[in-house]
Amino acid sequence: MTIKEAQEIVDKWITTTGVRYFNELTNTAMLMEEVGEVARIMARQYGEQSFKKSDKEVNLADEMADVLFVLICLANQTGIDLTEALEKNLDKKNMRDAERHKNNEKLK
């Protein structure tokens, strides 16, 4: 699935099953909530925190997909083509960071 296809699939789901988009502010808050859930798993699985009994059924891939879903919702409702945005962002990073990381002593 391409990013464009994902945006179309999410839009179709929202306008049929989901009824309508939540407003942009609600979706921004939901995005922060979903990112927090990913952070909680990362802190427990890869960091020093231990899992709680309530965390035993967590699924990192599913939580990352939740983040992507809400991000796509926000892109759709604000008229952003994520394929185009990502391409431009990568171009910017390639120009800005062409030598930066190679010359970073902390990364060697």
Image (tube, rainbow, N blue to C red):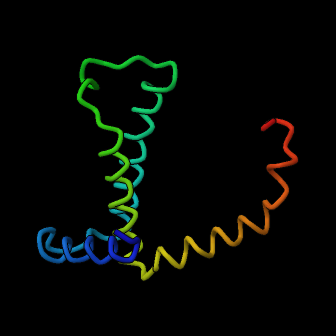
Q: Residue furthest front?
A: 1
Q: Nearer the viewer, residue 72 or 86?
A: 86
Residue 73, horizontal then vertical, whole percent: 34, 69
Q: Nearer the viewer, residue 30 or 81?
A: 81
Residue 101, horizontal then vertical, whole percent: 79, 49
Left of 87 or right of it: where is 28?
Answer: left
Q: For residue 96, which quarter of the picture?
A: bottom right
Which residue appears at 63% of the width and 70% of the height?
89
Residue 80, horizontal then vertical, whole percent: 46, 79
Numbered label tally:
0
Residue 57, horizontal then vertical, whole percent: 23, 29
Which residue appears at 31% of the width and 19% of the height?
52
Quadrant placement of the C terminus: top right
Quadrant placement of the N terminus: bottom left
Q: Is residue 11 above or below residue 64?
A: below
Which residue appears at 41% of the width and 17% of the height?
50
Q: For residue 42, which quarter of the picture?
A: top left
Q: Is residue 105 above or below residue 65?
A: above
